[in-house]
Image: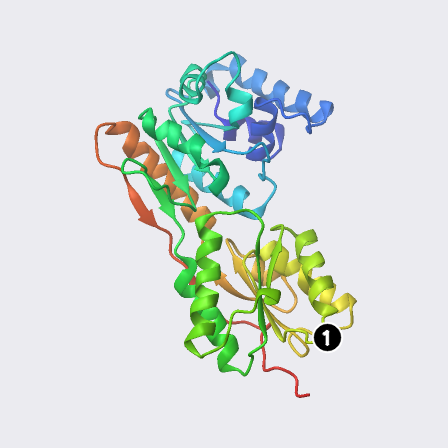
Amino acid sequence: MASIRQIAQEAGVSIATVSRVMNNNPKVSESLRQRVQMAANRRRSNPDTQSPKTNCFGVLYTTDRLTIGSPYDSAILQGMAEEMGADSMDIRLVTPSELMRGGRTLEQSLRLRGIQGVLIRVTADTAHHALDLVEADFPAVTVSDRLDHPKASYLAGSSRQASREAVEHLLSIGHEKIAIVNSRIPDTDHIERFEGYSDAMEAVGLTVEPHRVIRAWPNRRGGITAMNQLATERDRPTALFFADMEAAMGASKRAFELGLNVPGDISIVGVDDGDSRFFAYPTMTAVCQSAFQMGRDGTRMLQQLIQNPTGPPLREKAASWLEVHDSTGAPAPY
């Protein structure tokens, strides 16, 4: 069986595109679908390109909203591909509604597809799907979240302390009117970022005011919407802490469109899973973590679970750190 990376290389497309074709994603154009399928057929017909052994792992989205176009998910997939190796790799993107047809359980459907284990992208209100797999002893590692179950394995974020340091940085250069723009999607990663914000504010005696806690979708459009709301407030915040980099970048662009200078009029901090901070203008101060490394580490943990199915659950934390760049500065005098 040809690997997903080999097919991607043959077709001249990304790994994510091959996965979408393999999972019959309706958003893939017919011409692109044929191109990938022809590349897969060429690989199958040439025994010299076949892999001696293929590991089939899945990325399970517990909602039907696939976010594989995001920098975070793309980096996770790339990390998985690097850890699995080009010659023994098959990655499939799956959702419960796609799998649980015909009365089968989620675990039964995964095994029927030849999927040996999954990395799980979960939210607080869809965690029951992940817990079903844990109860069925199916190899699974939840990424960027934690499950409250004694047998659950997870690779959790650790952004609370770095988030606190980010807000402490804003406080240290004179900001007090600091708003947080957090994700509408509930998970422990974003809860930690809010807790870090709250820790820093409360440590200096500042109240976390409800009107300065904004919910937005973790994309550029969400950031634009948040900036539109905050920029029109009479008592506008002087600094914004965005729990997602795409939203932070959307907000930064919108600030310039509204005539606000970053950081002269408003300082912005984001949370960056890759290297997006270096492609923003100005270069963005950010709480950083490596989604690529999380993809590698999560895959390594999954391989260990498959090799030792009766062993204890595996639990690790992903590193997070603060980098101060050019999007933060002292508040403008009034």
Answer above or below: position of 214 versus 134. below
Horizontal side of 137 relative to 98 (left or right) equals left
Q: In terms of depth relative to the viewer, which is nearer, 17 or 9?
A: 17
Answer above or below: position of 22 versus 255. above
Q: Residues within 10 Å of mark 1 (few under 14, many from 20)?
A: few
Could you tell me which residue is drawn at 32 percent across and 32 percent down? Answer: 303
Q: Amino acid at mark 1?
A: Arg
Could you tell me which residue is drawn at 45 percent across and 52 percent down? Answer: 189
- Disc 1 on helix, strand or loop? loop
Could you tell me which residue is drawn at 43 percent across and 33 percent down? Answer: 128
Asked if one can make out residue 98 in the rendered structure from this viewpoint, the answer is yes
Horizontal side of 193 relative to 52 (left or right) equals right
Q: Quadrant of residue 140?
A: top left
Q: How many marks?
A: 1
Q: Quadrant of residue 331?
A: bottom right
Quarter holding the C terminus is bottom right
Q: In terms of depth relative to the viewer, which is nearer, 254 or 103?
A: 103
Q: In terms of depth relative to the viewer, which is nearer, 199 or 160?
A: 199
* Residue 300 picture location, percent across and down: 33, 38
* Residue 178 picture location, percent across and down: 57, 72
* Residue 49 picture location, percent across and down: 48, 21
- Residue underneath mark 1: 234
Answer above or below: position of 161 versus 304. below
* Residue 223 picture location, percent across and down: 66, 57
Q: Quadrant of residue 56?
A: top left
Asked if one can make out residue 123 in the rendered structure from this viewpoint, the answer is no
Could you tell me which residue is drawn at 63 percent across and 56 percent down? Answer: 247
